[in-house]
Image (cartoon, rainbow, N blue to C red):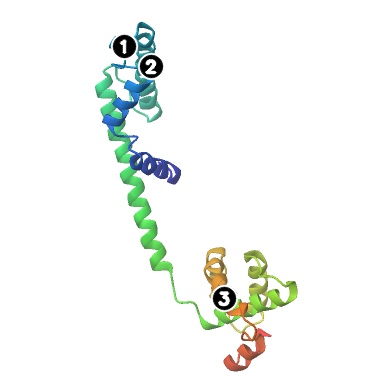
C-alpha cells in the first residue's frame, strides 16, 4: 500500500465511507428501498441485483490482484480482502514509523559555518535580485561559498538539501525583512570566516 493509498484509506475512515450502516443507508437511498408503497420497485430490484453481481466480481478480481486465489463465497472473499488490506496497512504504518525514527536520528545540529554560508548566500541573492531566492539558487550559491571554505566537501555536501533550505528560508526572510539586517561583512568579521565574502 502506497502513501497515497494510506491517505485515501484515512480519508475513507474519516467520512465513514467504510461504515456498514452508512453503506446500508446509501443503498436504501440509491435503490429507493422502503420509500414508497412497495419495498422496492421491480426496476430497482433488477438494478440492485446487477450491482450485487458487480460487487462479487469486483471482490474476486481484487483477490486476484492481491495475489490470492479468488473464492466463490462472498463473505469469505470480503474477509480475505479485509485481512489482506489490514496486513498491507500495518506494514505501511511500520515502515512509516521506522522512516520517521530514521529521520529523527539523521537530524543533526547544523554547523555554524553552514548556517553562516546559507545566510550570506540568501542576503547576496536578495540584494542582487531584489527578491527572496528560491532553493535552487540558494543551493548553488551556498555550494559556491562553502567551496571556498577550509571545510572538506564531504563534511557539508549532505547538508545542502531542499528540505533544509525550506526550513531555513523563512527564518532568513524574517531577519532580512527589516532595514538594518545583519550584513555578510559583519558575519564574516564576527565569525572570522573570511571565506564568506
Side (left or right) of 31 relative to 172: left
Frontmost residue, 125 versus 27: 27
Per the image, label 2 sits on a secondary structure element best described as: helix
Query: Going 64% across and 73% down the picture, which residue do you hit?
Result: 143
Furthest residue toward right: 128
Residue 190's x, y, as percent? 58, 93
- Residue that numbered label 1 is attached to: 40
Residue under the image location 34 percent in, 27 percent down:
68
Mark 3 residue element: helix
**Residue ID for mark 2:** 51
- Residue on which disc 3 sits: 174
Q: Residue at x 35, y 35 (%)?
A: 17
Residue at left offset 38%, top offset 26%: 62
Q: Residue 182 sits in which quadrant?
A: bottom right
Q: Position of residue 159 (x, y in %)?
A: 54, 71
Q: CA distance from mark 3 to mark 1?
A: 65 Å
* Quadrant including the C terminus: bottom right
Amino acid at each position: 500500500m502506497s502513501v497515497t493509498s494510506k491517505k485515501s484509506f484515512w480519508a475513507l475512515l474519516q467520512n465513514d465511507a467504510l461504515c456498514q450502516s452508512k453503506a446500508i443507508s446509501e443503498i436504501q437511498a440509491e435503490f429507493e428501498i422502503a420509500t414508497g408503497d412497495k419495498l422496492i420497485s421491480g426496476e430497482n430490484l433488477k438494478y440492485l441485483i446487477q450491482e450485487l453481481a458487480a460487487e462479487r466480481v469486483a471482490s474476486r478480481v481484487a483477490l486476484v490482484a492481491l495475489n490470492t486465489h479468488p473464492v466463490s463465497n462472498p463473505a469469505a472473499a470480503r474477509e480475505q480482502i479485509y485481512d489482506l488490506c489490514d496486513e498491507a496497512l500495518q506494514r505501511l504504518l511500520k515502515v512509516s514509523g521506522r522512516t520517521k525514527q530514521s529521520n529523527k536520528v539523521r537530524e543533526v545540529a547544523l554547523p555554524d559555518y553552514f548556517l553562516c554560508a546559507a545566510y550570506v548566500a540568501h542576503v547576496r541573492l536578495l540584494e542582487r535580485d531584489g527578491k527572496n531566492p528560491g532553493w535552487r539558487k540558494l543551493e548553488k550559491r551556498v555550494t559556491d561559498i562553502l567551496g571556498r571554505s577550509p571545510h572538506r566537501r564531504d563534511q557539508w555536501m549532505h547538508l545542502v538539501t531542499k528540505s533544509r533550505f525550506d526550513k531555513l528560508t523563512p527564518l532568513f526572510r524574517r531577519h532580512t525583512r527589516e532595514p538594518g539586517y545583519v550584513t555578510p561583512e559583519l558575519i564574516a568579521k564576527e565569525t572570522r570566516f573570511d571565506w564568506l565574502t
